[in-house]
Amino acid sequence: MTSLRVLAAMSGGVDSAVAAARAAEAGHDVTGVHLALSSNPSSYRTGARGCCTLEDARDARRAADVIGIPFYVWDMAERFHAAVVEDFVDEYARGNTPNPCLRCNEKIKFAAVLDRAVALGFDAICTGHHARLEPAPGGDGTVRLARSVDQAKDQSYVLAVLTSAQLGRAMFPLGDTTKDLIRREAADRGLAVADKPDSHDVCFIADGDTRSFLRRHLGSAPGDIVEPDGTVVGRHDGSYGFTIGQRKGLHLGRPAADGRPRFVLNIEPASRTVTVGPAQALDVLEIQASRPVWSGCPQPAGPVDCLVQVRAHGEAHPAVCEPAGDGVRICLREPVRGVAPGQAAVFYDGDAVLGSATISRTVNG
Amino acid sequence: MSNTDAVGQAPTAEARTSSAVSAYLDHAATTPMLPAVLAAMTEELAQLGNPSSLHNAGRRARRVVEESRELIAEAYGARPSEVVFTSGGTEADNLAVKGLYWARLAADPRRRRVLAAPTEHHAVLDSVRWLAEHQSAHAHWLTSGPAGTVSPAELAAAIEQDPDSVAVISVMWANNEVGTVQPIAQLAEVAAEYQIPFHSDAVQAAGQLPVSLAASRATALTISAHKIGGPIGVGALLLARGAQPVPVLHGGGQERDVRSGTLDVPAIRAFAVAVQLATQRRADEAKRLASLRDDLIAQVTAAVPDAILNGAAPGPGRLPGNAHFSFPGCEGDALLMLLDARGIACSTGSACTAGIAQPSHVLLAMGADDARARGSLRFSLGHSSLQSDVDALGAVIGEVVERARRAAR
C-alpha cells in the first residue's frame, strides 16, 4: 500500500475519530484538523450533539492525542457562513428545502478544505462519513461512491454531490462497518468519544428550532394557508417555516371537509401562500432536477433505469432518469410522497451512486 | 532530555539528542527547565512542610521560601518583603491591575481611569477591559508608535487630561509578540511625578534585560519562572513597599495579606535557582541571542525577500531573542503547521479561541491590516537555542512560505 499524506477532518465525534485512527493504522501519514465553523463557537449548539462547539474541538484534540497524530484547528467560519448558512436561509426564502450537510460537503469539506489541503501537500482527505468508495466499473483506476454496509447510518446521499475528482481525493474508512462496531472499536482504542451521542440536527441552529432560526434571519412574513381550491383555512407568519409534506405545526382552525389530516402541498414565497391538502395530493410521478453530477457513470445519453432517493434517510424508489436540457427528468415507477424542491435526487445502481441533481420541480400524479 | 549540563553551562550541539522537535524557536511561550532547576525542584518535592506551619517541618519549608525570596529580590532590585509569590504572570498581572485599581478607587472615588498600552499581554489587557465593563473603570489606551513604543510625553499628556482621575498605569517592559522594549524607567518616572502607581509586565524582559524594581522606580513588576528556565506555575509580583493592592485571592493571609494560598515550596525554590542562573548569564546570553537572532533575520529575509520584520529594529529597542515577521500572502496557521511538520516549533504569537488563530491585537495596534496580522510568525530564542536551530529554519522557510502562499490563493 502506498502511504499517503492524509488530512483527517475531526469533528469531535466518534466516527471521525475512528476514521482517523484507521487511516493512521493503515500506514498513512495522518494529520487531524478540526474545522471551526463559527467565529463565535459558543453560539452554536451547546452540549455534545453538534459539530462545532468548543467542547467538540477539545474532544477532537483529545482523540488526536490518543491516536498520536498532529492536530490543528482550521478556521472555516467565514466560508461556512457564506456557503452553507446563507445558502440555507436563501433556499428557505425561495420556498425550497435545503440540505446543509450536503452543501457543507460540496462547498467546505471537499472544496475549500480539500483545496487548501492539496496546496499544503496532502494527498487525500479522510472523514468519518458512513459510505464506501469502490472501483469504478471502467477499470480506469477511478472510484465511485457506494452505500455503507450500515444502511441505517448510510450517508452516501449527502456525499452524492461530489464529483469523481473530489471522490478521488476522499477516504471513507468506516463504510464497511456498522455503527455499533465503530463505537466498540472506539472504546477498544481508548477514545473517550466512544459513547458520545450522535449528532442529528443542523449544527448551526443551537436550539434545534429551525423555524425560529429562519424567523430571526428572514423576519415575519405573514400569509394565508389555503386549500387547493383557494379556501383560506389558516394564517402563518412566514412561508419559509414549511416543508413539502409537512403535517405537524400547521395550526389550522377547522378540520378538512373529509376529516382527514392535511399536508403542505406547495409553498409560494412571492405570494406568501402555503397550500395544504390530502396526502394523496402529495403523490409525485415526475421530478425535474438541475445541476446534475455524474460521478459513478458516464453522463447518460438517454433513459437509464435506476433507483432514486429524494431525501436523506429516505427510501430509494425505482425510476427512469434521462437528460433533459441542462438537467434531468426523473420518471418514478410508483408515486412518491414528500418530494421537496431544493433537496437532492440521488441516483443509485444497487448500492452504488451514479450521480445526483437538485430537485427543482415536481409533477403530481 | 536536556540541552544543558548539570550546572547549566551554555548548551552545545553535542549535548542535544534528537527528538520530534529539531528546532525549538518558541522560548517566549515557555523555555526548557534548566537541569539545576529540575534537580532543585525534584529534591524539594520529596520534602514535607507547609511554610505557614509553626513546627519544625514548617520552619524548614519557610526557610526555603525565604532564601528563595532573598535570591529573587536581589536579582531584581527589590527587598525580600517586596516579592509576592503568585501562580505565574497572569495572576501577578491581575493582582497588580485590579488590586491597585480597587485600592486607589477606595482611597479616592475620582480615580477611575486606567492607562495601559494597547499592545499589552491579555493578562493586563483583559483585566483592564474587565474593570471597564464590570467595575466602572475608564480604560485609556495609550497611543503607540509603529513599533508599539509608548513615549513618556504621550503618557504625561494622557495623565494631564485629568491627573486626579488616574487609578493605575500599566505598560509592559517588553512585548511578548514583537519584542518591543518600552522606556520603562522614563515612563515610571512620569508616573512617579504624579504619584500614580505604575505596573509593568516584565515577564518577557526578565531573562534578557536588566530588570530592577528599585532602578526602574516602578510600583509593581510581574515576573514568571517558566520564561527563564524555571517551572510553569510560579511567578511573582515585585511590589514596592507602601503599595497595598486589594487582594484578588482571600484566605490565609500569606504574602503580606496580598496573596493568600499555601506557598508552592518546590516551585519557589526552582524559580530562585532559575533566576540566579539567568541573572549570572544574562549579559553574555543577551549578546549570544542577539547574534543568533540577527542571523535568523538574515537567513529568513534571504530566503523570503518580501518578509517584513515587525517591531523595532534590532538593538536596544528590541528583545535580543525576538524575531517576528509578516509573510505577505500567507496565513500564519498554515506556516505554523508546515514548519511543525518539519520539526520547527514557533508561534503565530496571537491569542487563540478554540485553537482558532485570531489576528494579533499587537500588530493591529501597531497599524498592520488584518491580512498582515494573520500572516505573521514569531520566532523566539532562549537559553537552549543554537545556531543549528536557526540554520534548520533557514533551510526550509523559503519552501514553506511558497507552499503556504499556494494554499492561500
Image (cartoon, rainbow, N blue to C red):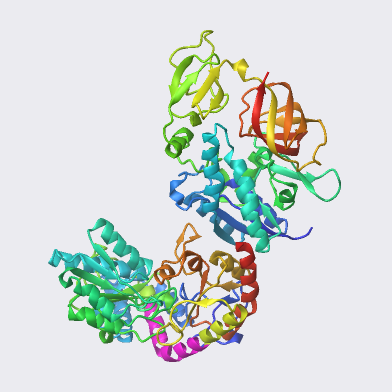
Magenta segment main secondary structure:
helix
Q: Which one is in front, B393 or A66?
A: B393
Q: How many marks?
A: 0
Q: In which quarter of the image is the N terminus of chain A?
A: bottom right
Q: Which region is colored magenta?
A: B270-291
Please give the name of the residue rendered at 48% of the width and 57% of the height, measured from the top-left corner.
B354
**Res. B224 image quadrant:** bottom left
Q: Which one is in front, B46 or B220?
A: B220
Q: Is residue A163 left or right of residue B340?
A: right
Q: In this view, does A49 lie above or below B291?
A: above
Q: Quadrant of the C terminus of chain A?
A: top right
**Looking at the image, which residue sits at the far left?**
B108
**Can residue B287 be found in the magenta stretch?**
yes
Where residue A261 appears, as percent x and y from the top left, is 53, 15
**Res. B298 image quadrant:** bottom right
**Can residue B169 be found in the magenta stretch?**
no
Where residue B283 appears, as percent x and y from the top left, is 42, 91
Say whether residue B311 is visible.
yes
**Looking at the image, which residue sits at the far right?**
A139
Where residue A164 appears, as percent x and y from the top left, is 75, 47
Q: In this view, does B296 lie above or below A143?
A: below
Q: Is residue B238 left or right of residue A295?
A: left
Q: In this view, does A182 lie above or below A252?
A: below
Where residue A140 appears, as percent x and y from the top left, is 85, 50
Say whether residue B17 is visible.
no
Please give the name of the residue rendered at 34% of the width and 63% of the height, measured from the top-left corner.
B126
